[in-house]
Image (tube, rainbow, N blue to C red):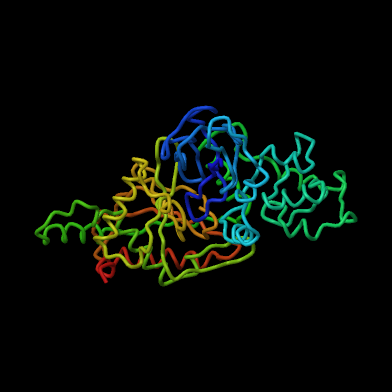
Amino acid sequence: MATEIVMPKLGLTMTEGTVEKLLVNEGDKVEAGDPVIEISSEKLTSEVEAPASGTIIEFTAQEGDVIPYKEVMAYVGEEGEVVDKSTSAPSAEPSPEEEETTENNKPEPKQESKPADQEAGKTDQSERIFITPLARKMAKEQGIDIRDVNGTGGNGRITRLDINRYTPSAKTSAKEVPASAASSEMEYGAGLTGMRKTIAQRMMRSVQTTAQVTNQRKIDVTRLMEFRNEIKEKVDFPLDNGELSVNTLLTKAVVLSLLDMPSMNGWYYDGEYTTFDEVHIGMATAIDDGLVVPVIKDAHNMSLSRLGSSIKEVVSQTRKGTLDGSLYSGSTFTITNLGGADIEYFTPILNTPEVGILGVGAIQKELDLDEQGTVIQKQKLPLSLSFDHQVIDGAPAAEFLQKIAGYLQNPYRILF
């Protein structure tokens, strides 16, 4: 009996993946563990291995297809074997319970552009209809034209509940659909491929579904820099794991501030605002193919030295492409640093469904006057905090920046 090769779930929030490259051809013999298909998700690129030895009987997905997780992409079995899809197909689709979990927990609406939509009644190639695999199967079995069904899921997606609720009298003609609704189905990232397309889709969804505002301010870090030098002089062992880097010290200050103000440590998605006791920090990291956000899990439980080494290790593995897939999702707040490029202020875009992201610029040297009127030099760190004004107002956002400033300007507080 043929064995299915399905789209894997690479991270907690992954709902679909893109088939980037078919690494073998139909008819090729493979061994269990051989790479067969190269895929990409919203976070990374990975290879899907053959689950069993045999012959590649058929590819049901082609390069460029966007496939929901757990859906079949290919079959491996005996040479000349005919695949009985009537018995294998259901296992590739989520159960009703899985579908509901996906709809409720995914951090952003997913888009589906599979030709399989045509099987349920779609005939106009220019029309995009978003529908879950289970709903599509139910529509086909019941003879329902999915163009007549109003979707209530994310991005207007049709779910199994919409199919169950559908009655012929609920049909809405195309001419009754407002122009604004039609434009909302525009494909973000059109003309792009791979990770670049995924980044485009995520950025556009972020700015289209949130009310983003950015507060900016400079923080005096003169004492922080003196603190670093003092610690380095007093310890009798090398500090070569980033324990006292500005990025580590800032991240620690952010973690402590999030514990002080949990309203910034949360998600807002699908009408639900959730805050978390645990702090999982996303570290925006540039790689050759674009930008990804690996996660420092449970940062609130880490000492300064452990936090520094964790940041260093996670970023290093991300750039090498060896980071575990589970560490590309689940962040509750993100930090993005452009200080290395001498950028002072910028407007970071929210890593939805998070409600806040902190942009870090390059430290600036400025002249100031002390209490006696003497000219002195100070070092100041520019910060740009973007937040979702749907759930966070300007005053609390400013208070959050003030808490970060309090830790950085009194650096010994970071140690406790």
Q: Is residue 189 left or right of residue 172?
A: left
Q: Residue drawn at (60%, 55%), measured in percent from left and top?
A: 210
User: Where does residue 348 sit, x and y in percent of width and height?
Assistant: 48, 49
Is 124 above or below relative to 104? Answer: above
Q: Is residue 130 left or right of residue 189?
A: right
* Residue 87 vs residue 320, the one in the foreground: 87
- The number of discs equals 0
Quadrant of the image containing the N terminus: top right
- Quadrant of the rendered structure where residue 80 is? top right
Q: Residue drawn at (36%, 47%), measured in percent from left and top?
A: 323
- Residue extending farthest right: 169
User: Where does residue 132 sit, x and y in percent of width and height?
Assistant: 67, 51
Q: Residue drawn at (82%, 46%), measured in percent from left and top?
A: 145
Quadrant of the image containing the C terminus: bottom left
User: Where does residue 300 sit, x and y in percent of width and height?
Assistant: 36, 67
* Residue 383 vs residue 131, the one in the foreground: 131
* Residue 366 vs residue 347, the one in the foreground: 347
Q: Residue drawn at (19%, 51%), measured in percent from left and top?
A: 240
User: Where does residue 409 sit, x and y in percent of width and height?
Assistant: 30, 64
- Quadrant of the rendered structure where residue 288 is? top left
Q: Is residue 33 left or right of residue 397?
A: left
* Residue 368 vs residue 97, the one in the foreground: 97
